[in-house]
Image (tube, rainbow, N blue to C red):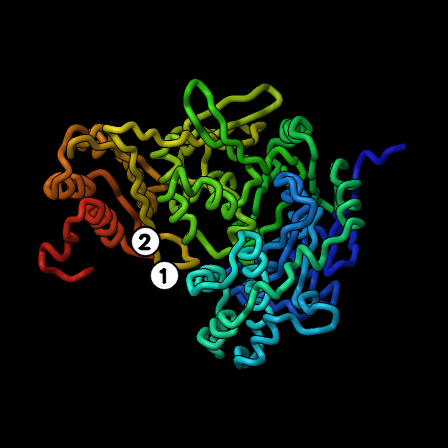
């Protein structure tokens, strides 16, 4: 008789099969590795995905199947905020699994040669990130590592005593043509067959008052959501990981679509002579950045600074949307792009414009039994006489790996120097990201001139009421928004024009 339900999670760790049961499924990966498996090379410092000391590499069976790969593609993640319930059917490689046949990996050898470690606490994370970078670059056909590559892939790793210079030097000396990818070294038909045998079986695990459901079919997920409307839906769960670690939040029941393969798809579709992307809720930010870059270069550029690669390899576009943060990086763009959210329940399916989705702080226009199943993003039109353009901005305390103070997205078409259409959304100025309808109306048929942008920026003084918090005062946020509009129009910032100092 075929097995109908799994009461365990299946993982491989450095090639070793592991079944996870009971309370362990609610542990973060770093704790599980260190305390339950004795793999103490993985370090924990911040416990919120900021420092990279806990970096490991994972290959997801579900993602490889969606991409049509006959092997697992390994990517770096933060193990401190990656919980085991989100890693079913994954192969985890820790620092202990990096050496090749008892010999130090080329990255480790280069670290020794270039004195790239002192206390060594951050070193395992750096090495795992660089190994992940080598795997990614070789997979994309690169033959060498550029400084831009290193700065990008190491943006989520911090070193406080060695300094980054010798670490970057160690990475720059690597000859990636002579380094085998982890997907080659750890390719094992037995592991893939094991995953394939378990993938069609839904997971149902209960421990005490906590419950985990991993259905393999969307209709089954909808039935569960109808039966348990208060159940916590999770996607990449990077924000949830921080809440659990820092606020000691304990979710009682979790439902994830991570084993529903269709949720990993990005479809390039045509409908009524319109072209659009249909993005599943399990598609990571990293994949979105790469796939839609040609159609939306400004959005792809913004996603490049969305977070570190470790975060982007777990976080999803659907999750960032559903998290409903007033400074969510992707939401202003999705608003001016008029993205459609696809919703489903046992009662049927419907689509909703993203501008109708946010009702108040963390309050969504979503029925208790509904699940977000995808995002539709229409490609911009580019007729010869009117070009669809975007301008996206994020202001934060530092460029990489930081929460925004203010975000702005503008979309417009212009002909003969006159705005035909203009859309504007601002984040960090209200309980939700908000469209600026008054400014949008004002900009219609106005010329692209400094005085147009100056007048529009002055209107913000009455259209937004930001709050003061640790990331900036209300006055500072207003000034930022005004100056972003001026920057868009190549106008000198307000404080400079008035001869004052930045408050």
Residue appearing at x 48%, y 45% in the figure: 290
As displayed, is residue 282 above or below residue 167?
Answer: above
Q: Identify residue for label 2.
A: 395
**105 with respect to 455 (left or right):** right
Label 1: which residue?
A: 398
User: In the image shown, does 107 or 141 lie closer to the viewer?
Assistant: 141
Counting from the top left corner in percent of width and height, residue 107 is at: 59, 70
Does the image show residue 411? yes
Residue 412 picture location, percent across and down: 26, 34
Q: Circle 1 sits in a helix, a strand or a loop, which is it?
A: loop
Q: Quadrant of residue 444?
A: top left
Could you tell me which quadrant the C terminus lies in? bottom left
Of 119 and 254, nearer the camera is 119
Please give left or right for residue 95 compared with residue 366 in the image. right
| Residue 247 can be seen, yes or no | no
The residue shown at (57%, 67%) is: 125
Instruction: Quote the CA–CA distance across marks 2 and 1.
Output: 8 Å
Residue 440: % across, % down? 23, 32
| Outermost residue to the right | 1
Q: Residue at x 44, y 75 (%)?
A: 165
Up/down of 419 relative to 19, above or below? above
Answer left or right for 358 relative to 176: left
């Amino acid at each position: 008789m075929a097995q109908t339900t799994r009461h365990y999670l299946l993982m491989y760790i450095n090639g070793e099969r592991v079944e996870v049961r009971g309370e362990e499924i609610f542990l973060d990966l770093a704790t599980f590795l260190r305390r339950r498996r004795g793999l103490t090379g993985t370090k924990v410092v911040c416990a919120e995905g900021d420092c990279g000391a806990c970096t490991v590499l994972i290959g997801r069976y579900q993602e490889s199947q969606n991409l049509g790969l006959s092997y697992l593609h390994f990517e770096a993640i933060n193990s401190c905020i990656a919980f085991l319930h989100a890693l079913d059917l994954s192969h985890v490689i820790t620092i202990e699994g990096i050496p090749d046949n008892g010999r130090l990996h080329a990255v480790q050898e280069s670290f020794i040669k270039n004195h790239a470690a002192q206390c060594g606490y951050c070193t395992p994370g750096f090495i795992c990130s660089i190994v992940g970078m080598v795997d990614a670059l070789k997979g994309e056909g690169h033959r060498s590592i550029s400084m831009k590559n290193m700065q990008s892939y190491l943006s989520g790793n911090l070193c406080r005593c060695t300094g980054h210079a010798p670490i970057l030097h160690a990475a720059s000396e690597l000859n990636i043509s002579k380094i085998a990818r982890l997907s080659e070294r750890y390719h094992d038909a037995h592991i893939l067959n094991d995953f394939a045998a378990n993938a069609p079986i839904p997971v149902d695990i209960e421990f005490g008052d906590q419950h985990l459901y991993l259905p393999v079919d969307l209709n089954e997920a909808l039935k569960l959501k109808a039966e348990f409307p208060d159940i916590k839906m999770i996607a990449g769960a990077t924000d949830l990981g921080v809440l659990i670690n820092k606020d000691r939040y304990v979710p009682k029941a979790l439902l994830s679509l991570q084993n529903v393969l269709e949720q990993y798809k990005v479809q390039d579709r045509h409908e009524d002579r319109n072209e659009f992307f249909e993005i599943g809720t399990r598609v990571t930010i990293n994949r979105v950045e790469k796939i839609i870059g040609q159609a939306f270069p400004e959005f792809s550029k913004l996603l490049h600074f969305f977070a570190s690669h470790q975060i982007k390899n777990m976080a999803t576009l659907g999750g960032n949307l559903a998290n409903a943060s007033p400074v969510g990086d992707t939401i202003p763009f999705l608003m001016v792009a008029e993205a459609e959210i696809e919703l489903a329940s046992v009662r049927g399916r419907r689509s909703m414009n993203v501008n109708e989705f946010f009702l108040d702080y963390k309050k969504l226009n979503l029925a208790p039994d509904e699940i977000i199943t995808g995002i539709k993003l229409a490609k911009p039109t580019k007729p010869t006489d009117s070009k669809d353009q975007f301008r996206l901005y994020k202001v934060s305390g530092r460029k990489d790996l930081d929460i925004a103070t203010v975000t702005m997205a503008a979309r417009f078409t212009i002909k003969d120097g006159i705005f035909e259409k203009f859309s504007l959304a601002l984040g960090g100025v209200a309980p939700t990201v908000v469209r600026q309808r008054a400014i949008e109306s004002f900009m219609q048929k106005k010329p692209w001139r400094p005085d147009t942008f100056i007048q529009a920026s002055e209107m913000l003084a009455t259209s937004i009421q930001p709050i003061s918090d640790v990331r900036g005062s209300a006055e500072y946020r207003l000034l930022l928004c005004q100056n972003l509009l001026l920057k868009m129009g190549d106008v000198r910032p307000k404080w400079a024009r008035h001869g004052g100092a930045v408050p």
